[in-house]
Amino acid sequence: MNEATNKTNEVILSVQEVSKSFGGVRAVVGVSFDLRRGELLGIIGPNGSGKTTLVNLITGFVKPDSGSVKYEGQDITGWMPYRIARLGIARTFQMIRPFAELPAFKNLIIPLFSPRVKTLSGGKYGDLDSVAKDLLEEVGFERESSVTYKAAGSLPHGYLKRLELAKCLALRADLIILDELFSGLSIAELASIVPIIEKLMVEGKTVIMIEHRLRELFRIANRVVVLNYGHAIADGKPSEVMERDDVKQAYLGTE
Amino acid sequence: MLEVTLIYGFINSIILSLVALGFSLTFGISGVSNFAYGAMYILAGYAVWIFINKLSMPFFLAVILAVVLTAGLGLALYRFVLLRVRGLVISEVIATFGVGLAILELFRYLGFTTFEYTLPVFTDGSIEIGNTYIDHQRLWIVGVGIALAVGLYLFTHHTKLGLAFRAIAQDEKTALSLGINSDRIAGISVAFGSGLAAVAAVLILPRGTISVNEGYDVLINAMAVCIIGGLGSTVGVVVASFLIGYAQMLTDAFSGPHWKMIVSLVAILIILVVKPSGLFGKQKELEERI
Amino acid sequence: MKQRRKERIDRGTKARSDDIFALTSYREMLYVAVPPVLPVIALLVMPLILPPYWQKVLLQTTIFALLAISWDFLVSVGMVSLGQALFFGMGAYVAGCLDHYAGLPIWLTIPLATVFGGALCTVLLLPVLRLRGVYFSMVTLVLPLMLERIIEATGMLGGTEGLTGIKPFGNSWVEMYVVIIVLLIALFGFRRLVTTDYGLVLKAIKDNDRSVMSAGINIYWMKAQALFISGSVGSFCGAYITHVYMFVGMPDFALDYSILPLASAVVGGMGTFAGSVMGAFILVPLSEALRNVGGLRIVLYAMSLVVFIVLLPEGIFHYIQRKYQQFERWVEVEG
């Protein structure tokens, strides 16, 4: 485990008994967990188990029916997404839709334009273009290579995912939520993205990953929460959680 | 006095739902907001007039023909215009708006604006409820209006086509994979909506002269009802119609007919502030917040 | 299987003037400079050579071009207005009232109407900003028609008669050049604005509002700002016309002011502002030339709207720009 200083042990995000129904479907039912600074939490579960809804509840895209979400001690339940983002919670989307006609680096202007970034850089925006190019380099776009200038719509899948990561970096987020970042990536592409996430962890960021690719996830995650039919059925170390019968059942679908 | 207000408020409400049903149905199924809706309504009115007065057709044949014609026009609108811009909301809005405008203003240009353009009532005469006289046409409106609302409900819940409608409305991709031709269904939904506009027209228009401006009023009323009731919700249409219908009648009775128009406007603005998806909006909250 | 595909390649001069700017002859300089400069010169010279009647047409065209630009700007933020007449009428009535009831001079009424008209429209449409898509179109279509009815029914602000005797400009040259200069400022200003970081964010809202939202940007506030900018331009048009016609009344909310800007922008080509101006300069004079067809005018606008949105959605401006900057050839590709 991490070196257990006070800083790393502090609870950064606290989700308490959140529930949400759409029509008659109970998408998330009374889910609770605490997340400590510096943790990498994986949220796993079969399709339709409420993972993305849970992310939407945390980031404000969906308002919970009941329960509360606290970030750094502040109650953010039901806040608008942009206010939550300004606190330093960044997210990626399952369906990646970049600003297709814009060059890749210009895609980062949008998070860089956020009031959060302005405040953190001392009230001035400065030259956002060059900041954007630096960020792209951080996520593995070769400096001054043509991909940086290519229209984002024409980028290969692997680059698009990295672009999404760069957006989170641009916001200088403390908590980064990645919704199925690994899906659709080749082994080689994965090998180039995993180090970026590992670097985030070294920098002290907190990360939540929704994943279906468990093998890759378990290599980097230090904790997982398993969702099934909207319920959190397990919470613990990856190796322990996967030993549990109910988790196996949820995944294999045996009765 | 109160009795008159209550009865005429009821009729007014039914008229509003009649006018809004077709617009709501098309949107609810295919997501197309048909801005040519008011034009379809007026077109049906003039078609009946022409069939009767120029081609000397019997009344009921003229009505049926007009309804079929309008529905066919709706189908054509989908096939030749909407299909090419499907999914591009901006283009859909502009294209249907353009078609509607072209039809309405063409009628104005051709001079269909005088008092001779009236439709005959279904049956003459009136009955007395309490101390209020109600003419037969208004009874027809109430009868057909209620029958249509109930019929539509049964249709969408118990027939194959109706169920296909609902399947498309809920999840177009899944419906597609189940072998439902979503383009065909969407086309039928536009045709269906236009046909309903025609039915509303032949029922409602005999109360006065047909005028081009009424086409705009119909579109405004239909949209007002749908915004307040929630786009695509049939229950919402009925409830919103009664809310606006009675509110209009009450303002009419207590502050004069001039203020009737303000009711819908104020209602729209209030609902957008308080519950933006409408009273019975089906829009998922996810979309609503963004 | 062999297939044929059309290939488009930038012309050499275009490629060299884009990033590195290496032009080698006067001919190439002309190639780059003529398209933006020539129309500007033409616009500035036209009032001097046109007969009085066509000067009035030019004035109208310029106003519609401005309205089309303001419409185009809203669309680039993802808001399709079907009621530019709302902005126009609001500006017209604010200016008219300031003149009629407060007796303010013209150099105060127009700027005040520009700002307050824009602000009023923004406040009226504020509730709709939270919703996406067709709601905005519906409400913008409904509002001007309803305001017209309300003025008619209640007799407020002059009722059906309107307010007459508004102060004129006094000098027809000032009148003409004020609006031409404003058009040029708006055209180049907006073209510039959308390339700035601020403009980029505005346009991003149209593409993917959720992504913008999760970047910590309050999209409603941004949309409100865009609405205010567009509303102010529209209100300026209304205020200006009020002083030209020395009258404000219900016709200021008429459908013409909604449909013509829309048609101009669609025919000319959305998203470039130059296209909107081009569209207005095609449609308005055309309808003047065809003025004996009278009421058929709106039908023609509406038809051109449908035809262009379905068959040439990029619009005339993009089409010409492409032909000017690229050559096309057929190439064979492995299918």
Image (tube, rainbow, N blue to C red):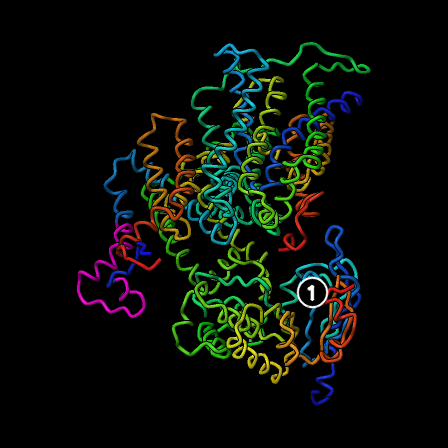
Q: In which quarter of the image is the N terminus of chain C?
A: bottom left
Report x, y in % for residue C236.
46, 46
The chain carrying label 1 is A
Q: Give the range drawn in magenta.
A: C14-41
Q: Residue A230: which quarter of the image?
A: bottom right
Secondary structure that dominates the magenta span: helix
The answer to if A208 sits in the magenta stretch is no
What quarter of the picture does the C terminus of chain C occupy?
bottom left
Left or right side of C73 for B141: right
Residue C176 visible in the shown view:
yes
- Measured from the top left, where is residue C245 in percent x and y? 42, 34
- Left or right relative to C118: residue A3: right
For label 1, the SS is loop
Q: Nearer the viewer, residue C165 or C254?
A: C254
Identify the residue at horizontal 29%, vertical 70% (top origin). C20
Can residue C112 be seen here? The reply is: no
User: Residue at (60%, 13%) from the top-left corner?
Assistant: B120
Residue plotted at (43% across, 59% down) = C193
How crowded pointer 1 is (Cα within 10 Å; few <14, some 14-19, many 20+) is rated as some
Give the amino acid type for the residue marked by disc 1 in the picture.
Answer: Pro
Corner quadrant of residue C214: bottom right
Residue A7, position as x, y percentages in the image: 71, 85
Image position of C148 with respect to A107: above or below = above
- The image position of residue C167, as x and y in percent, is 44, 38
Q: Name the residue under label 1.
A: A46
In the displayed structure, B178 sits above or below C21; it is: above
